[in-house]
Each structure stands twice: as C-alpha cells, then as structure tokens.
Image (tube, helix red, strand yellow):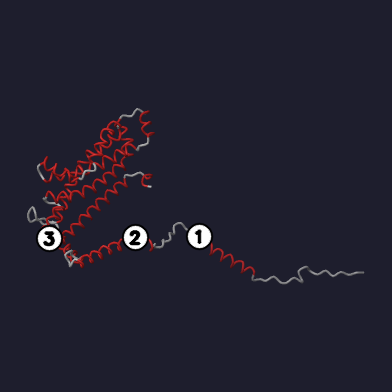
C-alpha cells in the first residue's frame, strides 16, 4: 500500500522579503516627487528668464563704434599730416563744447548762435517743403489718375527734374527780389519732383481690380480717392516725402551760402571768411545730425502708415 505524504505547497518556497512593501512605497514617493518637479517646470505661470544674447549685443554696438573710431583715426592722421591746419578731433571737441554752451546768443543780425542758425534753416525748409507738398501730392494724384494729364506733364517733369536746384536760385532772386523768398523758392522747386513722381507711380500701381469694382459700384471720384487711392498710395507718397526732405536739407545749405542771412549755410560761409575751420567742422556734424534726425523721423512715419504686406 503506497502511502503518500502531502506537504503544504509553500513549505519549500523561499520566504517573501518583507521590505518589498516599503520599497514600493519609496518608489511611489520618488515618482510623485519627480512628477511634482515636472509640474513645477511646466507651470505656465513660471516664466524662465531668457539668456542674454551677448553676440547680438556686440554685433549691434561694436560695428558702429569701429566705424566712428576709424573716422576719428583718419581725421587725426589728416590733422597731423597738414600740420594742424585741419584741427584735430580733440581741439574740435573743445571748440564744440564752447559753441554749444550758449547756442542761442544774439549779437546782431550777422552774429548769432548755432541754434538760431539751425532754426532759421529749418524754418525755410518747412515753408518751402510745405508748399511743395501742398502742390506736388495733389498733382501726383491727378497725373497718376488720368492718362491725358500723365502724357501731358511727363515730358515737362523729365525736362525739369534733372536741373540743379541752385540753377533756380537766380530766377528766385529776380522774381522775389529777396534772399529769403528766393531760398524758399529753391527748396520748393527741388522738393516737388520726388513727391509728384512717387505719388503718380503709386496711383498707377493700384490694382486694376479695385478700379473695376469702383466703376461697377459707380463711386464718385471723391469716394475713389478717399476709399481706394489714398490708403493704397500713402506708402509711396511718404517715400517721396522722405526723399524730398533730404534733398531740401541738402539744398538749403548751399542756397544760404549764396544768399546770406541767418542760417546754417551762411554760418559755414561766415566762419570760412573768418578762417575758423573748427566751427566749419562743427557745422558739418550739425548738418549731418539734423539731416539724420529728419530722415529717421520720416522713416518712422512711413513705417507707421505702411501696410504689413508692404513692410515685408
């Protein structure tokens, strides 16, 4: 008779380690801590401070400084090679400090500070430029809008535009019998062409579909101008304005040298007669800075009124 001995099935099995439960709990705690860290890093309310782009900063600052350093170095070499007949940068700087310490003094009609001279030149530019804008911009719209007027005035504009603005100065002196209106006339005649041409080109580049829709809707010329032409042509017009004011500021200096009176051009010529080269160099920098500011202001104005697709 065979006897069978039955043993419990887990008698021979190795004992289960009791620390397993604590290890599972520790793993869960570590996992929870990692998840909480991930949640903290992905929290949208926490904004990481972007690193400073030092390369971009250097590329924005270093090239202009090198350019100015090159200018000053060449200026110093020219001054040394001419035995200081051209003043050195340091001597010119000291003179500039003296000039700008009292820029608005007045000791008579022919002896005024640099501030009054700049303001007088800007006043002439503003009057001549304003008259040119009042005539040139509407004329540009008309020439661009109507083919007959375009064919009529294109030969005249092509003939007059290449003439040097100073060639018109004697005509102004003959007609207006005065230096100040003659200078304003010169500014007017040199400023009007860029505004006429750019405005006319802008009108001619308006998509024909816009004009076809206006014709279908039977819009009046005033509606076409205010609703279609003016918004589309404004960037071109502002470009013409920017070119015109740059030309006007260039011309006024030469015109004032010839006509005299108070103005930055006359100031340059008067300092040349007094053999004061330092003030001439200062005037050159003043003319450049004022022209740069005018250009920058008009660029900002043009950007503000330019459509996004045109900016791109």
Residue at which label 3 appears:
275
Q: Secondary structure at mark 3?
A: loop
Asked whether, in this view, residue 31 is left or right of residue 244, the answer is right
Q: Secondary structure at mark 2?
A: helix
Asked whether, in this view, residue 191 is left or right of residue 257, the answer is right
Answer above or below: position of 127 versus 285.
above
Cα separation, mark 1 vs mark 2, equals 38 Å
Q: Residue at x 19, y 47 (%)?
A: 125
Labels 1, 2: front one? 2
Labels 3, 1: front one? 3
Q: Position of residue 152 (x, y in %)?
A: 26, 33
Residue at which label 2 appears:
60
Cα separation, mark 3 vs mark 1, equals 76 Å
Q: Earlier in the sequence, mark 1 or mark 2?
A: 1
Q: Position of residue 23 (x, y in %)?
A: 61, 69
Q: Outermost residue toward the left?
A: 108
């Amino acid at each position: 008779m065979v006897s069978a001995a039955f043993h419990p099935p887990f008698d021979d099995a190795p004992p289960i380690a009791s620390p397993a439960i604590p290890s599972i709990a520790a793993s869960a705690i570590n996992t929870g801590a990692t998840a909480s860290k991930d949640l903290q890093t992905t929290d949208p309310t926490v904004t990481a401070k972007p690193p400073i782009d030092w390369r971009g900063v250097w590329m924005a600052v270093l090239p202009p400084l090198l350019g100015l350093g090159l200018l000053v170095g060449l200026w110093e070499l020219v001054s040394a090679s001419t035995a200081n007949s051209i003043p050195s940068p340091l001597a010119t700087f000291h003179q500039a400090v003296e000039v700008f310490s009292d820029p608005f003094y007045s000791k008579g009609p022919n002896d005024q500070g640099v501030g009054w001279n700049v303001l007088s030149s800007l006043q002439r530019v503003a009057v001549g430029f304003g008259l040119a804008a009042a005539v040139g911009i509407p004329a540009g719209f008309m020439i661009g809008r109507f083919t007959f007027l375009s064919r009529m005035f294109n030969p005249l504009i092509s003939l007059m535009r290449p003439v040097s603005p100073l060639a018109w100065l004697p005509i102004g002196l003959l007609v207006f019998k005065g230096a100040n209106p003659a200078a304003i006339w010169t500014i007017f005649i040199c400023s009007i062409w860029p505004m006429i041409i750019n405005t006319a080109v802008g009108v001619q580049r308006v998509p024909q579909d816009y004009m076809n829709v206006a014709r279908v809707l039977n819009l009046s010329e005033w509606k076409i101008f205010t609703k279609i032409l003016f918004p589309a042509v404004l960037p071109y017009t502002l470009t013409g304005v920017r070119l015109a004011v740059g030309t006007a500021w260039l011309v006024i200096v030469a015109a004032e040298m010839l006509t005299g009176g108070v103005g930055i051009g006359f100031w340059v010529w008067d300092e040349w007669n007094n053999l004061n080269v330092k003030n001439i160099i200062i005037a050159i920098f003043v003319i450049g800075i004022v022209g740069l500011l005018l250009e920058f202001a008009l660029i900002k104005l043009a950007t503000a009124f330019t459509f996004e697709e045109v900016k791109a």
